[in-house]
Amino acid sequence: MLKKLQIEQYIKELRDFNIGDKKQKNLTNSKRVNPILQKFKALRFIILSFFDFVVLKLILSFAKYRNKKIVYTTARFTTVAEGTREDRILKPLFTDNILFINHSLQDRISRINNQKTYNIGGVVKVLSFFQRQSSLTMRNFYAYQKVNQWILKKLAGKEIYLLLYYDLNSLSIILSPYRNTLKLIEVQHGSMINYFPYIKRAPLKVIDVFYVKNQPTIDFLKNHLCKDYDCEYRLLPYPNTQKNVYPGKYILYASTVELNGIHPVFLDYLNQNGQEDLTVYIRLHPREKNKKAYFKEQLQQTKATIIFDESKNWLESNTIKNIVVVSAWSSMIEDAADNGYKTIILEEFGKKRFGYLIDNKNVIFAPDVELLKNVLN
């Protein structure tokens, strides 16, 4: 168990790793919010969270609920189609008999996979006011820890699914006195190799079981995050979809949230493109779903056919064998390479993260428009 100062230092290091959030612009439609309505919504969020929390504590007294798969999640790990919210991470493993706990401090979720979801964020927000810590981060951390202690003391020996270990909610469990009574499981949702939270050696065993997409990720974790601790590793299956070669040129562009729009090199390529048999699928990062109008505006000048890919899983829905995946540094680069698609990396940071994949044949680094033209044409 780490001491208090060690805990705070470790959390600070993990919270300071973001590569571009401080430079990010808000491109969503900004509307004036009625302050009274805003306060009412905040109060409603807190009241409903307390109700969910009380109900959650009560139902965990019954084995029927304790034996469900306990999953901590937030809206970012879900998709919404035709008004129904579904989990997008756990599907290869299971889809039902799940007890979802939403730990977001802002967003309430009623149901995931048509299963009741319990929200604890409002309780955490209230408790954070009573924490004697210098920073909001640490006040929230200790508030999460208190809430989770009340929940998890009834779940000793159970498997707890955390969709990433380095958010405050997960860290509040990992860095708690009751951590060793639980079996903590992380399911990979994006590329881990060369990604800061997984590069640094952990000062304690953060996760007991990792579900990951490939053997290189297992090797990376063993030599970095988990170097000083034995963890169990299990492989996630990729979808097996029938694919065919189609006439014409097909590109799947994967956005990255820090860029706020189409990468300038790829946008130049599209604007210079004279071919009408080019079809470009745009797959927005989950946190950019509300920027679709901005992306459409950027793409007005191109002659290519533009289609926004809003499928739940692009690997599962894609049937085009000769599609080329293009991105700055999206985790889709790794997925595409694993599944045999030609892949182009546009950004130096992407080269740094995915350099181990670059072979100048199937995975290519093309940081300017002339190189990109040579590869695609």
Image (cartoon, rainbow, N blue to C red):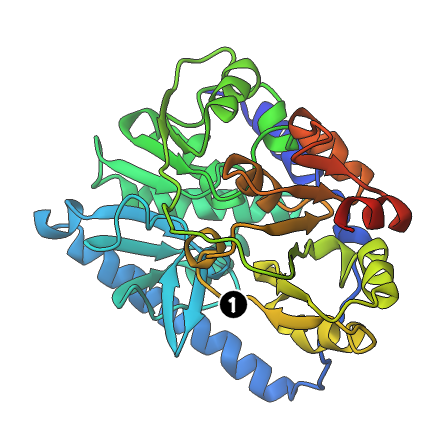
Residue 203 vs 98, above or below: the answer is above
Total marks shown come to 1
Considering depth in this image, is 108 or 175 the residue closer to the camera? Answer: 108
Judged from this view, the residue extending furthest toward the top is 228
- Type of the residue with mark 1: Glu
Q: Residue at x 75, y 30 (%)?
A: 352
Crowd tier of the residue under label 1, counting other residues whose Cα lies within 10 Å: few below 14, some 14–19, many 20 or above:
some
In terms of secondary structure, where does tag 1 sit? Answer: loop
Can you give x and y, in whole percent of width and height, for residue 312 in the image? Answer: 44, 61
Q: Is residue 254 left or right of residue 351?
A: left
Residue 120 placed where, x, y %?
39, 58
Q: Nearer the viewer, residue 93 or 43?
A: 93
Residue 304 vertical position relative to residue 368 in the rendered view, above or below: below
Q: Is residue 240 visible?
A: yes
**Residue lying furthest front in this view?**
247
Residue where numbered disc 1 is placed: 310
Quarter of the rendering containing residue 257: bottom right
Residue 57, quarter of the rendered image: bottom left
Could you tell me residue 46's position as x and y percent?
44, 69
Residue 66: x %, y % from top left:
16, 46
Depth check: give the residue in front, 253 or 2: 253
Q: Quadrant of the N terminus?
A: top left
